[in-house]
Amino acid sequence: MGVLIVGGTVALAVLLVQRLGGPPAGGAVMSVSLGEAEGARIAGIAATDRALAIWVARPEGERVILVDPASGRRTGEIRLRD
């Protein structure tokens, strides 16, 4: 019986260390290429549960690029200046 208690305690400790040391649940790392021209820079980012809005400052004008956070796909673009 004592062996089971010690084994269960060790298993619980290992499980806690794995859960606390790893990335958060559902926190997948995503890489998105915006495909912007040379000289463009990210001026700001805002997020909601449905979209990620990335404000891009370019030499020829600024725009907001909308990205779906679930898939990483570019879903739209708002041009602030032409």
Image (cartoon, rainbow, N blue to C red):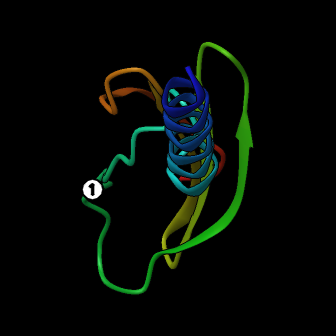
Q: Give the camera-side residue of 44 and 50.
A: 50
Q: With 73 as the anchor, is 65 left or right in this view?
A: right
Residue lying at the far bottom in this picture: please name it: 39
Question: In the rendered image of this protein, does residue 41 appear above or below residue 39?
Answer: above
The location of residue 43, given as percent across then percent down, is: 69, 68
Question: In the rendered image of this protein, does residue 60 appear above or below residue 28?
Answer: below
- Label 1: state its secondary structure: loop
> What's the residue at 56%, 41% (across, down)?
19
Q: Quadrant of residue 70?
A: top left
The location of residue 78, given as percent across then percent down, is: 56, 33
> What's the residue at 59%, 52% (across, down)?
17
Q: Give the camera-side residue of 43 and 21.
A: 21
Quadrant of the rendering where the N terminus is positioned: top right
Q: With 36 as the anchor, is 39 left or right in this view?
A: right
Q: Residues within 10 Å of mark 1 (few under 14, many from 20)?
A: few
> What's the residue at 31%, 53% (across, down)?
31
Q: Amino acid at mark 1?
A: Ser
The location of residue 39, given as percent across then percent down, is: 42, 86
Q: Give the camera-side residue of 48 and 53.
A: 48
> What's the residue at 32%, 54% (across, down)?
34
- Mark 1 — residue? 33
Question: In the rendered image of this protein, does residue 36 appear above or below residue 54?
Answer: below
Q: Quadrant of residue 76?
A: top left
The location of residue 50, given as percent across then percent down, is: 60, 13
Q: Quadrant of residue 16?
A: top right
